[in-house]
Image: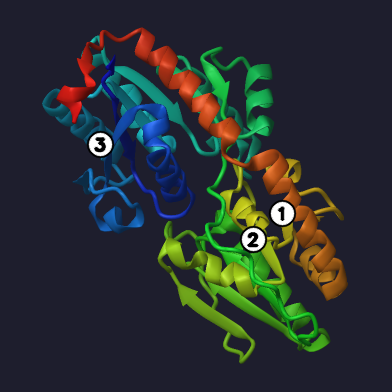
């Protein structure tokens, strides 16, 4: 039996902690369906964040000449390993890929996913305008550019981004274990936050809301998973019996936290998609999310959760008015949303199409199944 050998793809990232690690694990999980072999050029300190052992560590950050050094690392590794495709994840890796592309072999294809474009972030109009000009130019350099949400994809089309931009809506794998029944008469309401404790993720908005709610809703219990990554926010950790901090946890353990949560909070100031929303949905946990980025296209207000206006006051009000019966109803709808709209089938089919199109432009010999085994 003859078939094409696996497409060899080198994934590159400047940082993977959080959503990018989840995304890469999802790609790895479906590698056989894609007929791809993946390797990862990622920070040495974060090698434990993904399940693959095919890791090439680097130590280059976004500071100073970091993107240029990462570009040089891409070129060196590409000459050694000869990948069919180099796939950059996030903005700084994308810059490095654009710098590296002229020095890559002619037969090496390139793909870029911003995982949330910088020009969609909450910044001054001047910074947003300049970012959009740069990112629009970047969108023409790789052979394909992946947008992770319909929200960003449609705006990019209107703003003149390359037609090589394609929409592949993000997903997360479904849970392997059955959902456990939650206590119906627990007087405490358990609230979960799981993200970087950075400005973009709105950790400070949650803290301010907790301060407001401590007197009016003392039965609330807060579970906060994650830690600072970018260091762009002065971290206040609330010292109280009903506020629990866990730091970074192994991703395999995250379902244990969703299992005891009544509601999940996403107070992000910008969000290209919001993979943690889907993690909550697959566990039948409703979400209270800010009205930023792609979040309102996932969270339907008063259906599978609530949408607030990205202020502590509105978040506190939304939480104050909650009751467990309403949350149970939202939770059932959240699970339904995951199954009907965000399960992996479309994600897999879209990547099969993308990798198939790239394969068609690369000279890849056939080999026998017997030789492969």
Q: Quadrant of residue 84?
A: top left
State if disc 3 and disc 1 touch (CB < 8 Å).
no
Mark 1, residues whose alpha carbon is within 10 Å: few (<14), some, or many (≥20)? many
Q: Quadrant of residue 160?
A: top right
Q: Dot 2 lies on which element?
A: loop
User: Disc 1 or 3, which lies upstream in sequence?
Assistant: 3
State if disc 2 and disc 1 touch (CB < 8 Å).
yes
Front position among marks 3 and 2: 2
Vertical position of residue 182 compared to residue 25: above or below: below
How far apart are labels 1 and 3 at the CA level?
Answer: 40 Å
Percent x, y for residue 309? 79, 54
Please state if 369 lies on the left or on the right of 215 as rendered. left
Please state if 330 lies on the left or on the right of 63 as rendered. right
> Which residue occupies 64% across, 71% down?
180
Mark 2, residues whose alpha carbon is within 10 Å: few (<14), some, or many (≥20)? many
Vertical position of residue 151 compared to residue 50: above or below: above
User: In which quadrant will I find the N terminus?
Assistant: top left
State the residue position of label 2. 283
Residue 82 seen: no
State the residue position of label 1. 335
Please state if 21 lies on the left or on the right of 369 as rendered. right
Percent x, y for residue 19? 49, 50
Disc ID at residue 70:
3
User: In which quadrant will I find the C terminus?
Assistant: top left
Residue 51 seen: yes
How far apart are labels 3 and 2 at the CA level?
Answer: 38 Å
User: Disc 3 or 2, which lies upstream in sequence?
Assistant: 3
């Amino acid at each position: 039996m003859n078939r094409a050998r696996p497409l060899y793809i080198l994934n590159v990232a400047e940082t993977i902690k959080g959503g990018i690690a989840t995304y890469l694990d999802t790609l790895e999980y479906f590698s056989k369906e894609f007929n791809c072999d993946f390797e990862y050029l990622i920070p040495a300190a974060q090698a434990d964040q993904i399940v693959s052992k095919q890791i090439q560590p680097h130590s280059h950050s976004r500071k100073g000449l970091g993107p240029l050094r990462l570009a040089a690392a891409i070129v060196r590794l590409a000459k050694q390993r000869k990948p069919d495709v180099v796939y950059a994840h996030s903005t700084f890796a994308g810059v490095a890929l654009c710098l590296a592309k002229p020095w890559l072999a002619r037969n090496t294809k390139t793909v870029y996913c911003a995982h949330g474009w910088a020009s969609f972030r909450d910044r001054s109009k001047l910074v947003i305008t300049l970012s959009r000009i740069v990112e629009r130019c970047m969108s023409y350099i790789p052979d394909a550019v992946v947008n992770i949400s319909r929200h960003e994809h449609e705006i990019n089309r209107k703003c003149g981004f390359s037609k090589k931009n394609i929409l592949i809506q993000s997903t997360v794998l479904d849970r392997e274990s059955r959902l456990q029944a939650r206590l119906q008469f627990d007087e405490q309401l358990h609230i979960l936050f799981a993200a970087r404790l950075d400005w973009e993720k709105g950790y400070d908005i949650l803290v301010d809301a907790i301060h407001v709610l401590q007197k009016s809703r003392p039965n609330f219990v807060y579970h906060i998973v994650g830690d600072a990554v970018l260091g762009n926010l002065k971290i206040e950790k609330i010292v109280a019996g009903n506020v629990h901090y866990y730091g970074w946890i192994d991703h395999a353990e995250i379902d244990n936290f969703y299992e005891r949560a009544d509601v999940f909070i996403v107070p992000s100031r910008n969000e290209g998609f919001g993979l943690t929303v889907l993690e909550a949905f697959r566990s039948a946990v409703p979400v209270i999310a800010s009205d930023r980025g792609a979040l309102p296209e996932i969270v339907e207000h008063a259906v599978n959760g609530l949408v607030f206006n990205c202020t502590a006051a509105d978040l506190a009000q939304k939480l104050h008015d909650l009751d467990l019966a309403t949350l149970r109803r939202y939770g059932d709808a959240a699970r339904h949303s995951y199954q009907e709209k965000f399960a992996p089938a479309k994600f897999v089919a879209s990547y099969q199409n993308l990798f198939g199109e790239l394969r068609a432009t690369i000279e890849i010999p056939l080999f026998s199944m017997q030789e492969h085994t």
